[in-house]
Image: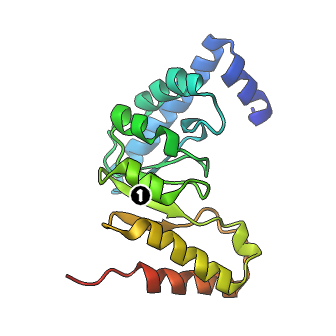
Amino acid sequence: MGMEKWLPLFLNGPAEVRDQLLTKCSDFFQKQAAAFRAAGADVLIYSNPFGSTDFVTEKIFNEISLPWMERDLAPGGVAGMVYYCGSARFNNVIERVIARLGLQVFYLSPMDDIAEGKRLIAGRGLTCGVINDIMLMEWTPAQVRAEVKRMIEAGKGDGRFLFGTLVMPYDIPEENIVAMLDAAYEYGSFAAP
């Protein structure tokens, strides 16, 4: 179908056709999640770009996205489910997602404020701060280290923090990948109790 046809259908209807397609997608997700869990997977990614108000309005998020997200997740529950919005920002919807869906792992956007995400999640789940992989192609190793340090310092605090990446483009210089990993190990280590 392609996004050029799907987005107008999602946003402008007709609602019965949109809902028919959403039902098929939701059924597929439920079957896939169940199959992965049956095969032993205990961590799954729930990716929904419409789970953020970067791509849809607050009204659409509340009236369409949230109810369909509830439908997607209801059969298998949210245990081990990571909430990921395709790198779209979602700090402004975290409270609603926790209240309505009960998700407990949040893979923030590189554009989300990590400290704000941690404050919103407030110990009710795991916060993942995500580096901007596109900038890894341009930054120097020193800039990469500084960004990793900044991110980890913003999120580490009381624990329940994970440092993450997105898609890792092929054009990232190897020295930047090494700098990122070295900095993550150096700044992300917690002292043993």
Figure quadrant of the N terminus? top right
**Image coordinates for residue 88, horizontal then vertical, percent:** 61, 47
Coloring scheme used:
rainbow
The furthest residue to the right? 4
**Image coordinates for residue 50, horizontal then vertical, percent:** 59, 35
Q: Relative to the observer, which residue lies in front, 56 or 174?
A: 56
What's the residue at 34%, 43% (across, down)? 78
In this rendering, would 135 be left or right of 126? right
Figure quadrant of the C terminus? bottom left
| Residue 74 seen in this snapshot | no
What's the residue at 39%, 52% (across, down)? 119
Amino acid type for the residue under numbered disc 1 = Thr
Tell how many labels.
1
Q: Is residue 84 above or below residue 166?
A: above
Quadrant in the rendering for residue 71: top left
The furthest residue to the left? 193
**Image coordinates for residue 23, horizontal then vertical, percent:** 53, 24
In this rendering, would 77 be left or right of 30? left
| Residue 188 seen in this snapshot | yes
What's the residue at 50%, 31% (across, down)? 26
**Image coordinates for residue 54, horizontal then vertical, percent:** 64, 39
Label 1, residues with CA under 10 Å away: few <14, some 14-19, many ≥20: many
Instruction: Check disc 1 and report its element: helix, strand or loop.
Output: strand
Q: Relative to the observer, which residue lies in front, 17 or 139?
A: 139
What's the residue at 75%, 74% (across, down)? 137
Q: Is residue 24 above or below residue 34?
A: above
Q: Which residue is disc 1 drawn over?
A: 127
Q: Relative to the observer, which residue lies in front, 152 or 66?
A: 152
In this rendering, would 17 be left or right of 46? right
Q: Is residue 119 above or below residue 147?
A: above
